[in-house]
């Protein structure tokens, strides 16, 4: 596997709407594996294909919270084992619950954090890495991360939605999970 370069807003790919994935071949599987390795090495909890200069509607995430855990917190969960999600051609079909403000970061915008208001719960439909249809209902931290990554597929960055953006101090940066 290969570590991919995570691009910043100076690369125009990050601001373009990504194209639908239509071919589920070995090249796509390699891209997914490389994105997972890159995300973990960064370290981050999510990574969208446009962040590695691939204009495809695809993102990966590794999250500790599972749907239905009863955790209503929008705070980042403690490190530990989590579930890996590969979402291809995702579509958020429902937003529910009150919007909640939470602090977000992004691997493509290092050293900055921002407070972003997002719906607390979502339903998302997508294809898995094998092209199988899936549907997930989730809330809290997991819903926030998936919405953040979904935005990348439309060329939207968290700083576009943030109520407040600030540069992080080195100590704060070391404790922040990046998406």
Image: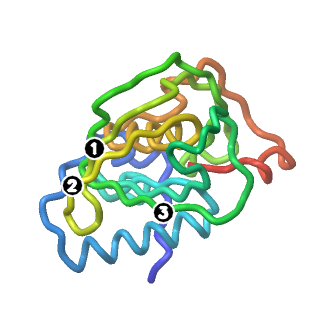
- How crowded pointer 3 is (Cα within 10 Å; few <14, some 14-19, many 20+) is rated as some
49 and 16: which one is in front?
49
Q: Is residue 148 left or right of residue 155?
A: right
**Occupied quadrant, residue 79:** bottom right
Question: In 3D space, how far apart are the residues under numbered discs 3 and 1 (Cα atoms)?
Answer: 16 Å
Q: Position of residue 105 (x, y in %)?
A: 62, 41
Q: Which residue is mark 1?
A: 125
**Against 124, is 21 above or below?**
below
Residue 172 percent across, percent down from the top left: 82, 44
* Along the viewing direction, whichever of 49 and 124 lies nearer the viewer: 124
Horizontal and vertical percent for residue 51? 43, 53
Asked if labels 1 and 3 touch by Cβ distance under 8 angstroms, the answer is no
The residue at which mark 2 appears reads as: 133
Residue at 41% in and 32% down: 122
| Cβ atoms at labels 2 and 1 below 8 Å apart | yes
- SS assignment at label 3: strand
Image location of residue 90, percent across then percent down: 28, 45
Looking at this view, name the residue that lies furthest to the left.
22
The N terminus - image quarter: bottom left
Q: Which residue is mark 3?
A: 84
| Residue 154 vertical placement versus 34 (above, below) | above
Position of 104 with respect to 17 (left or right) is right
Cβ–Cβ under 8 Å for marks 3 and 2: no
Q: Residue at x 20, y 49 (%)?
A: 19
- Does label 2 or label 1 sit earlier along the sequence? 1
Crowding at dot 1, Cα within 10 Å, few <14 / some 14-19 / many 20+, comes out as: some
CA separation in Å, label 3 and label 2: 16 Å
Q: Residue at x 42, y 22 (%)?
A: 96
């Amino acid at each position: 596997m290969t570590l991919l370069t995570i691009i910043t807003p100076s690369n125009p790919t990050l601001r373009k709407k990504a194209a639908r994935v239509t071919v589920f071949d070995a090249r796509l599987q390699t891209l997914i594996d490389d994105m997972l390795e890159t995300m973990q090495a960064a370290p981050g909890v999510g990574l969208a294909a446009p962040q590695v200069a691939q204009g495809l509607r695809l993102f990966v995430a590794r999250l500790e919270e599972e749907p239905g855990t009863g955790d209503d917190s929008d705070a980042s969960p403690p490190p530990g084992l989590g579930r890996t999600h590969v979402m291809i051609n995702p579509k958020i079909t429902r937003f529910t619950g009150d919007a909640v403000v939470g602090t977000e970061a992004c691997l493509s915008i290092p050293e900055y954090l921002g407070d972003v208001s997002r719906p607390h719960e979502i339903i998302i439909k997508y294809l898995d890495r094998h092209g199988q249809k899936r549907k997930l209902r989730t809330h809290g931290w997991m819903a926030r991360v998936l919405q953040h990554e979904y935005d990348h597929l439309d060329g939207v960055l968290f700083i576009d939605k943030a109520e407040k953006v600030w540069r992080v101090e080195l100590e704060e940066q070391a404790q922040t999970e990046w998406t």
